[in-house]
Image: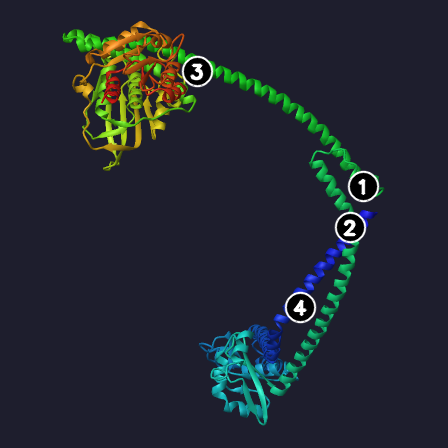
Amino acid sequence: MLLKNKFFVALTGTITIYSILISVATYQIIAINEKEITSVTTNVENKYIHRNVSHYANDMSNHLSVKLKEISHISNKYANILKKNSNNIEDVLNKSNEELRKYSTSTYLMNDEIIFTNKNDRFTIKQYKINNGIYLTFKTNITRLVYSISESQTRNDFLSLIIDQDMNVVTKNKSAQQYLSEYKEKLNDITKIEELTFDEMITMRNISTKKAWDSEIHLGKELYIIATQPINNYPWNVAVLIKKKTAKSYSEELTNKIHNNYNTFIKKIISSIIMLTILTLFISTLIANYIKGPLILFSQWIREIQNGNYEYNNPLLYRKDELGALARNVSLMAQHISTLVYDLEKKIDDRTNRLKKSKELAESANIKKSKFIANISHELRTPLNAILGLSLYLIEKEDDEEKKKTLNTLYKAGEGLLEMVNDILDLSKIEANKTITNNEPNSIDNIITNIIDIISFQSNSKNININYKENKFNHLNIDKKNLNKIVMNILSNAIKFTDNGGNINIKVKYLNSTNLSTDLMLEFTDNGRGIEKKDIERIFNPFEQIYDKDKDQGTGLGLFITKKIIEDMNGNISIESEVGTGTSIYITLKDVEVIKSKIINKYHHMRREICKFNSRKYIAIVDDIAFNREVLKKKLEPYDFDIIEGSNGKDILDKLNENRLPDVIFTDIKMPVMDGIELSRIIKDLEKTKHIPVIAITAQGMLDEETEIKKYCDGYLTKPIDNESLDLVISHLFK
């Protein structure tokens, strides 16, 4: 019951407010348009005349059409009678004239046919052929016919007349005919206005110089207002005249009525607004008393439920009306929500614990994987360091070209194995998003020819020709290590999947080149077995191999790593291939910096340049593996250094003599008893040794390890150590 009453009160209040708004809007509209209403009333006589003239002219036109149809029907009737019975011609003519007299039509018998009928004449003629040489002719006086029609349509409050095409006036009022004949020229101007709208009519009435249309005419002592309307289908016009004082009385009467109604309406609006305002205030009070209080209680309750207080004791629960029933339903809903929230929180806690355990297991597995990769890298790089270091040492010492060629093949094979180790490390870095680009000035020709030399033992074993024409372009500021990996991986795959005696073509293009940058494009084309279209995207997935019989060849990481490196270098890779024909791979590196100066790669074109020093340097080499120390000693032989060795950090500290401290310490990182990082910390903490540079030698190349090295060491070299890097470090330390 309460809700019904409140609904009624609310509905009444809404209707009242809308009524007030509508009343105010109506009042504003009427007030704004008061001048326009007054303007319309001043022209009311024009509208009155125009409307009546239009109706009158249409009536005249319609009556004329009806009369002409009746004449045509009667003419046909008598023509058919004569055609059937031509003996009683005189009797037929008499009956025809008698019947058509009221239509202003006469009947004749003529011996000649009238060739045409001019519609602009005052007469219309229609002929029927009875027999040879005799025509029944009906001649209608249109002027008299129209006049007879106009007399039957005459109104009491205005004068109507007909104006023919010669500006002659057809009217029974002789005085009007006399005066209007004097205005024949003005009437000619009036009848030229054939279709005049009411708005145009008002506009013309307001023209001060009435050249086009003088709407006022004196007939005797009276001033008349005149308007015309053409009759449809005939060149006549209907003219209507009304005394100006009569039209003015119509205007004043209508204007007074409009103003009276307007004032009455305004008074009613004001009264309604006052009453509705009072009623609205009363209804507002009712709404405040009946609804505001319970709504506030409901609002407080909802806030408590939002804050998690589902046991809130609301006074509305004890009401007996509809609000009480609603409150009890809300209470049940709150209890249900409480149960759901409890169950949900329990599930969330359980899942959170499971996710936490899974996260811990994943992190633990990831740490173990990183340690495993680091250990594998160390174990593989250690013998590779010896292989590459000693083979390079022998190459430099050997004078026999054939033996040097064999040693060079051994060295390049070791570099190929090193690349496979690097693939494993690169995958780990890519997964951790820790790849680093190190751009340096490099020759693209040198990089590509060097890779071709490295893999020549693979291509020669299958008699595959690798064709490359050097471009002699300016050097580019580019990451040599990454570009080596890209070219090595692409060429290795091309050789692997190209049959014996095949061809591999390499093209280098420099696009969009400026003085500062260029787009480097590498194109590799082979005539191997090709790749199906559905497999092209798959080959960029890690560990993906598309040929089952080749699963034992490679790690399946090459192209995956290649694509990631290219993307990190602001480039893209695309493949076009056809099974049985071959494959083309296109690599584009965008906006590569151009280095204008010519840089000589001395390690390709000349032997090592060994720096000479004023005094004999004292070098410490620390490594737990003896042949690693031996490799470094062989590389340092050209410098003629005095060398002290240690198998770990503690061993070298025990051997240091205060009388002669080493000028530099080369230390391995991963060693038993005391590793390289701990050794470097101790060296830097001791006052007597903190000036000694410590160069770390790492076999792992992991980024986390590099961070520690950069923090505690003065530099580092990565196994296997190449002569170029070693010479650069020494020249920097002792310059």
* Amino acid found under the numbered disc labelled 3: Ser
Q: Which mark is residue 27?
A: 4
Disc 1 and disc 4: Cα gap in Å? 46 Å
In the foreground, 310 or 557: 310
Residue 380 vertical position relative to residue 611 in the rendered view, above or below:
above
Sequence order check: which comes first, mark 1 or mark 4? 4
- Please report whichever mark, 3 or 1, sits nearer to the chain's N-terminal start: 1
Q: Is residue 213 left or right of residue 659?
A: right
**Residue 679, labelled with which disc?**
none
Residue 140 in view here: no
Mark 3 or mark 2: whose residue is earlier in sequence: 2
Q: Which structural element holds mark 1?
A: helix
Measure the alpha-carbon separation of dots 2 and 4: 30 Å
Nearer-the-camera pick, 240 or 702: 702
The residue that mark 1 highlights is: 316
Q: Where residue 370 is drawn, which disc sits there? A: 3
Sequence-earlier tag: 1 or 2 = 2
Residue 426 place in picture, x, y as percent: 37, 19
Task: Give amino acid for label 2.
Answer: Phe
